[in-house]
Image (cartoon, rainbow, N blue to C red):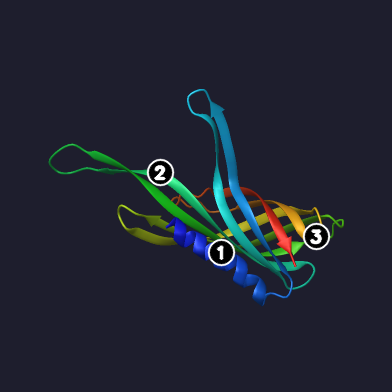
Amino acid sequence: MTKRFAILAGLFLFVTPLFAQKGAISVFVANPGGGWSSNEGTSANGDIGVGAEYWFSPRVSATVNVSRHEDVAAFTVFPINGFPTTTFSRVYEYPIDALLRYRFAGSERWKPYLGGGLRAVRVFNPPFGDRSWNFAPEFNGGVTFLMTKKLGLDFDGRFVPIENRYTGVDDGRVSVGLSWRW
């Protein structure tokens, strides 16, 4: 599944600029985290993703972001005869965020925005072959800091106002990434 995600992400990054007159592509890490312990040493984690943005006007844009979330889930089976058994499995989820954004007037380098749209999460559970889609409304806000006219550093936050208990993807997500504008 990792190869398939890499191929789709690569196509997404290279095909999207061909159709857009003015926009950006980005790579990001959602919910970055990490730590250190004497037993395990240093650790880092987060969901890796890619995005594309198209501007309809200097203030209004549409963006689509795709990331990959990996989680471990426990499944317990209670047979009629015998003892319950628990199986641990990796669950792969692919959040797709489709958003409209409004950019506020800022300085030449700081570009704050607010937006809203839809989050679709594709859940894939390999041992059981379960595949499903979950949809929810989503709010978005953040700021882009332009390091050059084309290269930006993105700080983004997203929130799903309804409880989505069928996925391991957090209802509130923050991300940090790099964007390239054309």
64 vs 5, left or right, is right
Residue 88 coordinates in the image, percent (x, y): 33, 42
Looking at the image, which residue is at 84% across and 60% down? 105
User: Do we see residue 160 in this rendering?
Assistant: no
40 vs 74, left or right, is right
Q: Which residue is mark 1?
A: 10
Q: Quarter of the image holding residue 24? A: bottom right
Question: Which amino acid is tagged 3?
Answer: Phe
87 vs 167, left or right, is left
Question: Which amino acid is tagged 2?
Answer: Val
Q: Quarter of the image holding residue 128? A: bottom left
Question: Which amino acid is tagged 1?
Answer: Gly
Q: Secondary structure at mark 2?
A: strand
Residue 175 coordinates in the image, percent (x, y): 63, 49
Residue 101 coordinates in the image, percent (x, y): 70, 63
How crowded pointer 1 is (Cα within 10 Å; few <14, some 14-19, many 20+) is rated as: few
Q: Where residue 104 is drawn, which disc sits there?
A: 3
Q: Nearer the viewer, mark 3 or mark 1?
A: 1
The quadrant the C terminus occupies is: bottom right
Residue 114 vs residue 25, the one in the foreground: 25
Spatial separation of the CA atoms under disc 2 and disc 3: 40 Å
How crowded pointer 2 is (Cα within 10 Å; few <14, some 14-19, many 20+) is rated as: few
Query: Farthest residue in the right direction?
Result: 107
Q: Are marks 3 and 1 in contact (CB under 8 Å)?
A: no
The quadrant the N terminus occupies is: bottom left
Q: Earlier in the sequence, mark 1 or mark 2?
A: 1
User: Do we see residue 2 in this rendering?
Assistant: yes
Q: Which residue is mark 2?
A: 72
